[in-house]
Image: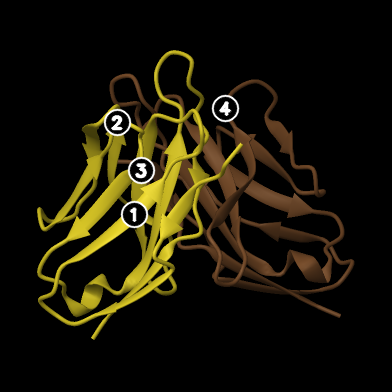
Amino acid sequence: ETGVTQSPTHLIKTRGQQVTLRCSSQSGHNTVSWYQQALGQGPQFIFQYYREEENGRGNFPPRFSGLQFPNYSSELNVNALELDDSALYLCASSLGGTRGGIEQFFGPGTRLTVL
Amino acid sequence: AQSVTQLDSQVPVFEEAPVELRCNYSSSVSVYLFWYVQYPNQGLQLLLKYLSGSTLVESINGFEAEFNKSQTSFHLRKPSVHISDTAEYFCAVSDRVYGGSQGNLIFGKGTKLSVKP
């Protein structure tokens, strides 16, 4: 069973640029959630994708967007980067639907630095 | 909206001493509660969870947590800590379920446990 993987591990961008982060969900999972963890803070929910549809969104502006693909992998896109976007971005996968559980499994994260 | 409060940002403790990391959540209808652990430069690992049933839940590495509905708490305890327990611990509550999938997790700000020899 393959766990949740994320790429890249680290990324440095400048203000105004755009970035794409990637996540491969655990085998058999159909739901991906994205979280932003700023330094010294707990993770904050960005959005969730279930069967390729956005299925819930936190308090993040529209320049944070995402996709989920037929194999349930996912991308997080951030446009017009700001300094405050510097954070660890965590992806979590889970099994949704009537057979699903509550538990989310996290990847190692992508560390984004905006200069 | 749900919220989670972790009352201690840092907890220093000596090896083999007991420890309690405190967590309170805002009251709501049925809640699901979790403790996650984060080692330096790593993602989150699930330590234990409360979904229903027995209010005392245990992990495989000696941690336990007790769900107290009247006090809206889910404190994490270990009777004897090891150096390897040094990490940051996050308490989380699951928000409402959206459609056919799970709701999002709402995290506290974390407690850094530092175990000293």
> What amino acid is at disc 4?
Leu
Q: Nearer the viewer, mark 3 or mark 2?
A: 2
Is label 1 or label 3 in front? 1
Q: Distance of mark 2 from mark 1, alpha carbons?
A: 14 Å
Query: Please, which chain is the residue tagged with disc 1 on?
Result: A
Disc 4/disc 1 C-alpha distance (Å) = 30 Å
Q: Which residue is mark 4?
A: B51
Q: Which residue is mark 1?
A: A22
Single out the mark in the foreground, 4 or 3: 3
| Chain of residue at mark 3 | A
The one nearer the camera, B104 or A30, is A30
Amino acid on which the number 1 mark rests in the picture: Arg
Residue at point 45%, 30% (across, down): A29
Residue type at numbered disc 3: Ser
First in residue order: circle 1 vs circle 3 = 1
Residue lying at 38% horizontally and 50% vertically, measured from the top left: A23
Residue under label 2: A70
Quadrant of the drawing holding the C terminus of chain A: bottom left
Q: Which mark is residue B28?
A: none
Which type of secondary structure does the marked residue at label 2 adopt?
loop
Residue that label 3 marks: A33
Say if B81 sits above or below B15 in the image.
above
Contact check, label 2 and label 1, Cβ < 8 Å: no
Q: Both on one chain, marks 4 and 3? A: no
Residue A1 point in image, percent of width and height:
61, 36
